């Protein structure tokens, strides 16, 4: 996960928001995969407490 911090820059108590929802066509399909990967990394780090 080089180059991925997973930090939360939202205020305490504010749920993380998603502002971009790629469609399932063209390069946006690849972007969606990358966003899902980062979400998974973020969840794993939060669960692990690091």
Image (spheres, grey):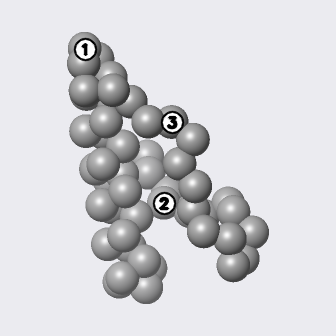
Q: Which residue is mark 3?
A: 20
Q: For mark 1, does the 10 Å Cα neighbourhood hold few (<14), some (14 to 19), or many (20 or more) residues?
A: few
Specify the quadrant of the image occupied by residue 24: top left
Q: Position of residue 4 (x, y in %)?
A: 44, 51
Measure the alpha-carbon separation of dots 1 and 2: 26 Å
Q: Where on the picture, by quarter, is residue 12? A: bottom right
- Sequence-earlier tag: 2 or 3: 2
In this picture, is 15 found above or below 36?
below
**Depth check, front residue: 8 or 14:** 14
Contact check, label 2 and label 3, Cβ < 8 Å: no
SS category of the residue bearing label 2? loop
15 sits left or right of 30 in the view: right
Mark 2 sits on what residue? 6
- The image quadrant where one finds the C terminus is bottom left
Q: Residue placed at 32% from the left, 72% from the top?
A: 44
The label shown at residue 26 is: 1
Is residue 40 visible to us here? yes
> How dense is the environment of label 2, judged by Cα within 10 Å: few (below 14), some, or many (20 and up)?
some
Provide residue 13's location: percent of width, then percent of height.
Answer: 69, 78
Q: Is residue 29 above or below residue 37?
A: above
- Nearer the observer, 20 or 3: 20
Q: Secondary structure at mark 3?
A: loop
> Would you identify the image quadrant in which residue 47 lies?
bottom left
Would residue 2 be seen by someone viewing this image from the given angle? no
Q: CA distance from mark 2 to mark 3?
A: 17 Å
Residue 25 lies, in percent from the top left, at 24, 18
Q: Nearer the viewer, mark 2 or mark 3?
A: 3
Going from the N terminus, do you reach mark 1 or mark 3 first? 3
Q: Are marks 1 and 3 in contact (CB under 8 Å)?
A: no
């Amino acid at each position: 996960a080089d180059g991925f911090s997973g930090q939360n820059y939202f205020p305490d108590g504010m749920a993380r928001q998603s502002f971009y929802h790629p469609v399932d066509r063209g390069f946006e399909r690849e972007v969606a995969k990358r966003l899902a990967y980062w979400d998974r990394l973020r969840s794993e780090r939060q669960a692990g407490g690091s």
